[in-house]
Structures are given as C-alpha cells and as structure tokens.
Image: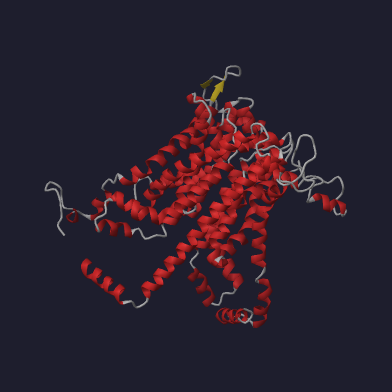
Amino acid sequence: MERHVHPDLPVEPDEPPRRSRRRFQPAPYLLGAPAILWLAILFIVPLFTMLSLSLQTCDPNTYACTMTWNFGEFGNVISRYSDQLIRSIVYAGAATVIDLVIAFPLAYWIAFYGGRRKNFYLLMLLVPFFVSFVIRTTAWQFLLADQGPILGPLKSLHLLPQNYHVLATWIAVVAGMAYNYLPFTALPLYVALERIDRRVIEAAGDLYSNRTSVFMRVIFPLAIPGIFAAFLLTFVPAAGDFVNASILGGTNNTMIGNVIQQAFLVQNDYPAASALSAILMAAMLIGIFAYSKILGARTIEEYV
Amino acid sequence: MSAAVPAEGEVRDLSVEMPPARGRRRRWTSYILPVYSWLVLIYLLIPIAFMVIYSFNQSHSRLPQVNYKWEGFTTKWYQQWNGIPGLGDAFFLSIKLALATTIVAAIVGTLLALALVKYRFRGKGGVEQTMFTNIAAPEIVLGASLLGFFITLNVDRGFVTLLLAHVMFSIAYVTITVRARLSGYDLNVEWAAQDLGATPWVTFWKVTLPLIYPGIMAGALLAFALSIDDFVTSSFVAGNSTTFPLWVYAAVRVGIPPQVFVLGTVIFTAGVIVAAMNLVSQGRRKRQEEAARKKANEPDESVVDVEAEFNVGVR
C-alpha cells in the first residue's frame, strides 16, 4: 500500500514512540466536550457558587447578598441544627448498615449463581425506579399505617399493643430509607463480586480451603472496595434525604435535608442552606478521599 | 432432574474434599440463598404492588382519596384519570421532560463513553472522578447548589432549568452504562471497516452504532427512569412548573387521589414493557453471537481459507 505523507511532515515510525503517543489528539475532547461542559457548568460551578453563598451575608428583606467572608456561618449552623445533623448521621448510618447486610447475599447470589438470568435480576433491582420514589414512600405510609395491612392484623392478634405505631418514629424513617436506597447498595456490591476472578476461588479450593474460609479469606477481602463504594453511594445520599423524614417521620424526626429545603425554599436563608449543603458535600469528599487513600485512586473509577 | 443433582454434588465433593455428611446437608441449605434473594427482590416490589392494587380500589367518600381499606374493585379511576385539575398537566410535563432528558442525555453521555473507551487522554481520571462525585452527591446538594447558581445568574426557573438539571444528573449514569457494554465489544472492527475503505462517518453508522445500540438503549432507559423518578432536584429548580412527583408530594398532606396511583401504574407498566423488550432482544443477540462463534470454531473450509488469506495479507 502506498503511503500518502506530506513531504514536510516527519514520517511517523521514525519518531520515538513516546512522542507520538503524547501528540495532542482532539478526538476524545471533541467527543467528550458536550458532557464535560454540561457537568462543569451545571455541577462543578454551582458547587463553588454554593460555597461562596455560604460565606456571604444576605439582607433579610431584599435577599440581596454580599460577600463578607463570614466563616462564622458554619459554626453557627452546626450549633443551631446539631440535632438534625446527628439524626442524619445516625439514621443514614443505620439504613446503610441494614442495606449492606440485606444486599450482600443478594449481590453474591446474582454474581455467582445468576447465570444467564443475571441481566434479568439486575433489571429487577432497577424496576422500582420507574415509580417515583415519592409514590413508593407514600405507599409505605399506607402500608405502615396504625391500622394498615401490616400493623392491623398483628394488633388484632394481640401480638402488638393497640397503641403501638411505627409512623412518625425513627423506625419508619430508617425503614423507608433502607427500602429506597437498597438498589444503590446492591449494584456496587454486585460489580465488585462479579469482577472476582473465578480461578482464584478454584485455586483456593485446590489448596484445601473449605467454603467458609474461601468466603472469609478470598471473596470477602476482594469485595471490600465494593463494600466501601456501596457505603458511600448509600450513606451520602441517605444523609441528605428529606422525603422519607417528612412523609414517614412526622415532625420530630427532621433531618438535615429538611432544614436545607426549608431554609432555601421557605425562609430564603441562602447562607445557612448553602453552609449546610457544603458540610454534606465536604463529608462526601472526605469519604472519597479516604477511599482513594486506603484502597487506591484507580479502584474507585471502576464503580462509576 | 433428581438424578442430576446428586451427581453434581459428588463432583463438587471430590474437588473440595468434603465429608459426605456435609454434602448431604448442603442440599437443603443450597435453597436458602435463592429463596432469600427472591424475597428481597419481591420486597422491592411491595409498595409498587400496593400502588397497582389500590389503583383499582373503590372509594365512597365525597372527595376520593387513597385509603388502605379495600372497598371493592373498580376501573372507575382509569376512566376518570384526568378528573383531578392540575394532575394531568403535571403528568404530561413529567413525560415531556423525561423524553427530552432521555434524548439529550443519551447522545451526550454516549459520546463521552466513546471518548473514555477509545482514547487515553489528559484529564480522563478527572472526568471519571467527577462522574463518581456526581453520582455520590446527595440530590439535595445538587438541587440547592443549582438553585443558588440560577439565583445568582438571575435565571427564570421552569422547563429549561428542569431539563438542564435532569440531563446533568443523568449523563454519568448513561456514560457508565454505555461504557460497560462498549468494553465488552471488540472495537478493532472499526479499524477493519476503515481498512476496507469506510469513512469515519460510515464506520460510525454502519459498525459502531449497531454494536453499541443495546448499551445506548439501556442507558436511555435509565435516564428516563431517573428523570420520571426525580423529586428532590426538581423541587429546587422547578420554579412555578409542577412535575408529577412534585404534585404528588404536595398532595400527600391533604390525601392523594386514586388517579395518582393510576398514572403511576401506567408509567410503571410502560417502563417495564420497554425494559423487558430490550432485555429480550439483548438475550437473542447474545445467543446469535454464541451460535456464530460456535459455527466459526467448527472445521469449515471456507472460513479457514478466508482466515489464512487474511493472515498472509497482513504479513
């Protein structure tokens, strides 16, 4: 085949391979540009706007804000809303632990015994998303009602006292969050377990390891990055949730999400709302940073 | 069937060197995991089943509201689906928004997936970290920061800001889904097409797109589900527009009409049908590919000849 090379250009194979690899390629940037710009302008820039808003002081009447580098706002909101902050951490933590315990065997089963129906099981995990989670949470409100289909029969059998109720307690909030975030826990766990090289497990069997120790000493350690990713992807969104708390939790179980929503949309207290959002975001970034420090920066990309 | 099960157990016992007593006990314990897993999958469907069943529930109160008491079967609410002022508009706004989000996010996300799979480039790690952060970020942070951004820029909130926000949180999901399907395919066929004289444009339409089409469909479906499901981010950037979930949330306090469950059931059914169709076509394709591969491995003279010729040509 004939080569059509401009006489002024150096012929490629004569160049050291390192240089030719470093040559600027426009193609990936052109392909990625729309998505990258979309995320940069509507995800990254607003985060910085939020950070700057949290340091501003706003006029309570006109809502006009000016930058005052008011770092005090952070201490202010932490002390003012400490109850809700603690509740967010405890409730989201409880829901995450419950989800990890529920989801791990399921993810293990799909990854190791799913066979040809793997995609079907994964679809089953995603099917609830076709119903708005406001409706799903509302359905739980009916299901958990004092005389509803779950508590009603138990009460008529006198297994529960007549005045027992779940709604408007922390139990309902944690149960609702555990339900709503279960797929977010199961999917990263599945990815991690699916990726384990089956030959490693065979090798452990060949070396006289029994099933328990194969699981404890081979499968579980290899799944740890997935467990951490699942923790992050469940705990952080759950900590910011306010729908479960407001539909299932009544007035005494408000979380930090409820405060942010109220401050932003009702009280127009932009600095407080921004400071609280920034705290949530910072907690998440610390989690991601800890992940890449402990388990390596490259592994986290595998779960995106 | 019953003869095959002990045989399988025997083989496993030999390889793991288990005492026979444990092998016998495993037979009933081997049902624990599948039964448990199915129970969890069914648990995920409980509130949806409630929604579907109670969309057929009779109601005798003057202002019909969903109630956990079963008062008899009726399809009345399906006939009067548009009987609540505002609900129909909210429903159609959500459908319109979800379709627009799906189209934009599918295109933009697929292009990014192609860039990530086919090229190594400076900033790739940063893009991937941003995607992870975007998925892990609490929705309330996405919504609140966008609202702050729009307020600072003095942008009117409405359909456009909803679309901007929905595409923003869908891109990463689409990219990941498409990329996952892409990495399974041999993209050397693109080089083959270009060696045979296809222009990049023709290569994309005739080779790349048909290969990654199921991945794009899966990503698009996910974007649709995320958009139709979204409440938190929408509540911040919607302005005066009301999407279906926003309408429902506002109605929770006063009691939701049965029509909400009717429309929810309709969206759910449509989504499941499309997802199932995609799953079936994917399965069929996989089987075809496997059959083709099996055929290629069989000693077939014409195939061998072509391969030999091809090798000579390359050398």
Q: Is residue A155 above or below residue B236?
A: below
- Closest to the observer: A70 or A43? A43
Say whether residue A105 is visible. Answer: yes
Residue B41 picture quarter: bottom right
Question: Which residue is located at x 43 percent, y 68 percent?
Answer: B290
**Left or right of B208: which side holds B248?**
right
Say whether residue A297 is visible. Answer: no
Residue B136 picture quarter: top right
Q: How many marks?
A: 0
The percent coordinates of residue A112 (x first, y second) are 55, 66
- Closest to the observer: A72 or A56? A56
The percent coordinates of residue B274 (x first, y second) are 54, 52
Question: Which residue is located at x 78 percent, y 48 percent?
Answer: B72
| Outermost residue toward the top in this view | A61
The percent coordinates of residue A115 (x first, y second) are 54, 67
Query: Which quadrant of the rendered structure holds the N terminus of chain A?
Result: bottom left
Question: Which residue is located at x 66 percent, y 53 percent?
Answer: B45
Q: Is residue B116 above or below residue A269?
A: below
**Left or right of A231: which side holds B43?**
right
**Left or right of A220: which side holds B294?**
left
Report the colour scheme: secondary structure
The percent coordinates of residue A188 (x first, y second) are 54, 55
